[in-house]
Every structure is written in C-alpha cells, then in structure tokens.
Image (cartoon, helix red, strand yellow):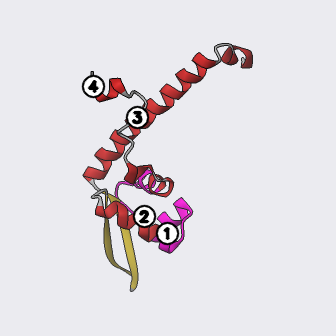
Amino acid sequence: MTDSEAAPFAYEGLDRVIHERARLGVLTSLMARPKGVAFAELKSLCGLTDGNLSRHLQVLQEAGLVELAKGFERNRPLTVCRITAQGRARFLEYLEVLEKVVRDAAQAAKAAHPGAAAAKA
C-alpha cells in the first residue's frame, strides 16, 4: 500500500513554501507575467506592504522559485521579479494537488448530502 493510499487526504504535494496566501498570490502574479513584474506593481497586485513583499520574495528566492533583477530605470532603482523554471514546475505540481483537494472536498460534500445539489437546481 502506498502512502497516498494509506492517507488519501494527507496531500503531501501541498508545498508549504507556496501554500501561504501571500506567496500564492505572488507566484500566481508571476505566472501570469513570465517576463517579470516590477516590485511596486507586484506589491499592488498582491495587496502587500514593501516589507511584507520583501520577506515573502526572500523565502521564494531562497527556495529557488523566484529571481530578482535589480537595476535602474530613469535613474531610479528598479527591482524586477520573475518566476524561475523550477518555480514554474513546482507551482504547476502544487496546482495539481490543489485541484485534487477541491475534487475530493466536492465529492465528500456530495456524498454527505446527496440531495443538496439537486435541491439548489
């Protein structure tokens, strides 16, 4: 018996680095913009403060999921955040597990209350 058969609801693939709400938002934003996102725009997209975003990016960078490119634009500092190839692969794996969680939860809800879906329709 495999681990997944013994504990079907353990969801080992829910990566703790990714699963935090802010980091999930950051990675989703970066997946949508593979060429990168300026720090200020990413902060706005995710509704985070400078310090909060910096800390989450540090965790993601240490895990090899994102890379930061620092430079200048019109004599002003500019940090561009990009998802790495490893980050893209891990995020897609994470999404597969998350989809399984949603399917399992929906099936469990239907099994527990079989007439509920029909009553709503």
Q: CA distance from mark 3 to mark 4?
A: 12 Å
Q: CA distance from mark 2 to mark 4?
A: 34 Å
Q: Is residue 112 left or right of residue 103?
A: right
Q: Secondary structure at mark 2?
A: helix
Sequence-first tag of 2 and 3 = 3
Three-letter amino acid code of the residue under disc 4? Thr
Q: Disc 3 marks which residue?
A: 10
Q: Is residue 56 visible?
A: yes
Q: In the drawing, what numbered circle is on residue 52?
A: 1
Question: Can you say which quadrant of the picture contains the N terminus?
Answer: top left
Q: Earlier in the sequence, mark 2 or mark 4?
A: 4
Q: Which mark is residue 70?
A: none
Q: Closer to the camera: disc 1 or disc 4?
A: 4
Mark 1 vs mark 3, foreground winner is 3
Q: Which mark is residue 56?
A: 2
In front: mark 2 or mark 3?
Answer: 3
Read off the residue under disc 4. Answer: 2
